[in-house]
Image: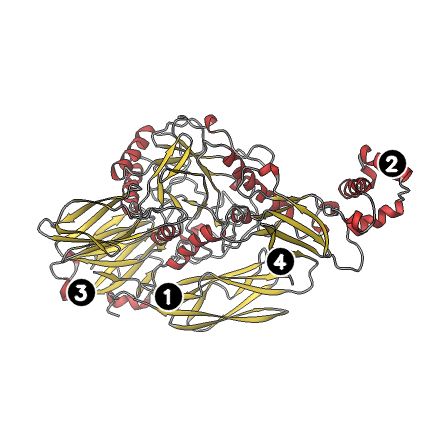
Amino acid sequence: MKLNMNENWYFTEEYQDYNCEQLQSLQQVRIPHTVKQLELNYINEKDYQMVCGYYHELEYRKEWKNKHVFLCFEGCAHRTEIFVNHQFVGKNECGYVAFQFDIQSYLKEGNNLISVKLDTREQLNQPPFGNVIDYLTYGGIYRKVHLDIKDSQYIEDVIVKASASKDLELQIVGHELEDKNLKIILNETCIYEGKFKEKITYHNDSIQLWNLEHPNLYHLSINTNTDSFACHIGFRDVSFKEDGFYLNGQKVKLKGLNRHQSYPLVGYCATDSLQEYDAKILKGELGVNCVRCSHYPQSKAFIEACDQLGILVFMEIPGWQYIGDERWQEIAIDNVRKMVSQYRNHPSIFIWGTRINESADLDSFYQKTNEVAKGLDSSRPTGGVRNFKKSHLYEDVYTYNDFYHNGTNDGCEASKKVTSDISKGYLITEFNGHMYPTKSFDDETHRLNHALRHAQVLEDVHKNENIAGCIGWCMFDYNTHKEFGSGDRICYHGVLDMYRNPKLAAFVYASQSDTKDVLEISSSMDIGEYPSGYIDRIYVFTNCDSVKLYKNNEYVKEFYPSEKYSHMKHPPIQIDDTIGCLLETKEGYDSSVSKDIKTILNAIAKYGQAALPIIVLLKCAKLMAFKHFTYEKGVELYGKYIASWGNQTTSWKFEGIKNGKVVKTVIKEPFETMKMKVNVSSQELIEKDTYEMAIVSVSLTDQNDQVLPYVNRVLNVKTSEEVEIIGSSSISFVGGYASFMIQSKKKGTAQIKLEVDGIASQIIGIQVRKEGVLDETTSN
């Protein structure tokens, strides 16, 4: 029996050995909880480092007598000591895995005091600590807590092997279950009923495999008359070969992004709906097929969402470059054991990361981590992320952070130059990132360069058949330590910002999917955004076959995917001619003269009249000598077709064409009116075993729904009592977006009023419901 323990905790930033009578003087909190809410940026990581205390009153129930009472924590950062009625129960030395203790022998009749001494300091001798770390590690009981009440005879663990051959093998670890009967149900089919057996096999030809397009899941339940176990499983095989990655025997090019588990203000403290939201963004918005959990095991809710959506997951142990002493290494090896044991039944996980991210070779240590992972799960390959070449390879896959691309060279290095064993699989686990940090409010040229760097790596990885794929750094911006980032404690490495709003580079990934029509233009078409007023490059990131361009509703030209990116599924399309056929249709020039005039006008924009190349000057002379072209005419055409001077508003229309039909249209024209658009991560906050959260993102757009990246207004938010806003209710727009998070408080329809000066306010409604809330253990 599982009992909720997420309500009515008490918290203090300085741990003391309190009695129940003293708790009312402390701050009452709900789990998950962060020890310190931070600002968006310019924060100090010392603020969340402390030895703090969490306390909970637990009323003993008579039906617990002679039973096991497991106190279960899904995640506490970072060193946890548990006390019951002032008696030490045990400790956990990893902030990223679940742990539990049987507290039956410490309980008494009536009220019991659960005390949690939590050390969140970064000086701990355990992973990932010991040196600098390029991410904040936060602190708190940031994942859920529950009691698991078990009879003396119970199911300890179930190891599931469900293969693409449609075979199911169950290894059931039982505690005194030898004389029990088992009933095992797969979906609604009973596949075994009889005496307890440690190993049970089953085969059914009608099983549907788990894959990226159809992530078929089966509900497995195992029951005795004293206990039960349930999970979702998927039948599939994963493997790496010399020439790439295979899922169910079919070669798949891996394309993904790295993910931290952090959120603005609250750090790691995010509920299930936000975990699921990230998975939905990866699959539905960005169209990737894999994600790396960098650099630690992440929420079960996130992994379950990847199971359901069909996203492959790279799971790795905590750490960042540093390897500590013998005790530190023992904890890291135990982290491998816990990671594999706790996550191995998830079909989405396709590889175990058994090395500390970007650490040096240490043979005895990594032989052991690999051995532990293989001993617990032989069905998956192992890897270990490196940032150097020709490393000692004890894993199945050489996983490498390739930061070779600098914007002007190849997107990646050849695998044979990097791996120490070409016969094994090879996977790029990071690229770009710190090579070109990009803010959502950078100028258009910077944002475009960022996007093209991602495109170039995707192109060259697809071109290299023996590279299994690549996982970009990274999904979204994140808070970091003083040694990294932009001085404001933010690493601007993401294709999304911290609130999951897209940068231009996000559309490089989105355009590779066919789940929805994508048509994103890299330029606002405002010449003042560019030096000398010359728009030198315009790219369209799209999954359309072609793009038609119109100027003031006059057809200019149709453009097709760039040959430079021919190995991508949907290459970017470059708009390299904004005059097109207009000189012919509007001015009456023949095609030859039109071509020369376009060359001259574009050269003037690029170089200026005083620095025109000789070949351009010769074209000018030829036109003047033989076509009676005048300087005054050139000035007129320049103003009309390059600078777009004059009273008329210049409107650019881009039409995305698929199968000969217009499927999407984007209009770029000078700003006239401002509108507010609202996106909510979830329209319904359903409290199941704790409170829920949502991200609300407000963008300001022009009359054509184009986000205004340089707007500097302030959003003011007012909420009804059903929810509360996390942090300030006044939020500045950054990169065209003002975003905030809300937390559920009570059931009903929450009203959230959004106000921006000069724009009509909006009120959005969010339903807050309580559904199937688990039995609450507290006596309060």
When the figure is inspected, residue 646 is found, relative to residue 591, above or below; the finding is below
Spatial distance from mark 2 to mark 1, Cα to Cα? 74 Å
Q: Do the residues labelled 2 and 4 touch (CB within 8 Å)?
A: no
Q: Mark 4: few, some, or many residues within 10 Å (few <14, many ≥20)?
A: some
Which residue is located at x 31 percent, y 42 percent? 164
Q: Mark 2 points at which residue?
A: 622
Q: Mark 4 points at which residue?
A: 706
The x and y percentages for residue 198 are 15, 45
Earlier in the chain: of badge 3 and badge 1, it is: 3
Q: Name the amino acid, label 2.
A: Lys
Spatial distance from mark 3 to mark 1, Cα to Cα? 29 Å
Spatial distance from mark 2 to mark 4, Cα to Cα? 43 Å
Q: Do the residues labelled 1 and 4 touch (CB within 8 Å)?
A: no
The x and y percentages for residue 780 are 26, 70
Q: What element carries label 3?
A: loop
Q: Name the residue under label 3.
A: 60
Q: Which of 351 and 267 is in front in this view?
A: 351
Which mark's residue is nearer the viewer, 3 or 4? 4
Which mark's residue is nearer the viewer, 2 or 3? 2
Q: Do the residues labelled 2 and 1 touch (CB within 8 Å)?
A: no
Q: Name the residue under label 1.
A: 686
Earlier in the chain: of badge 3 and badge 4, it is: 3
Q: Would residue 563 be found to the left or right of residue 43 on screen?
A: right
Which mark's residue is nearer the viewer, 2 or 4? 2
Q: Name the amino acid, label 4.
A: Gln
Earlier in the chain: of badge 2 and badge 1, it is: 2
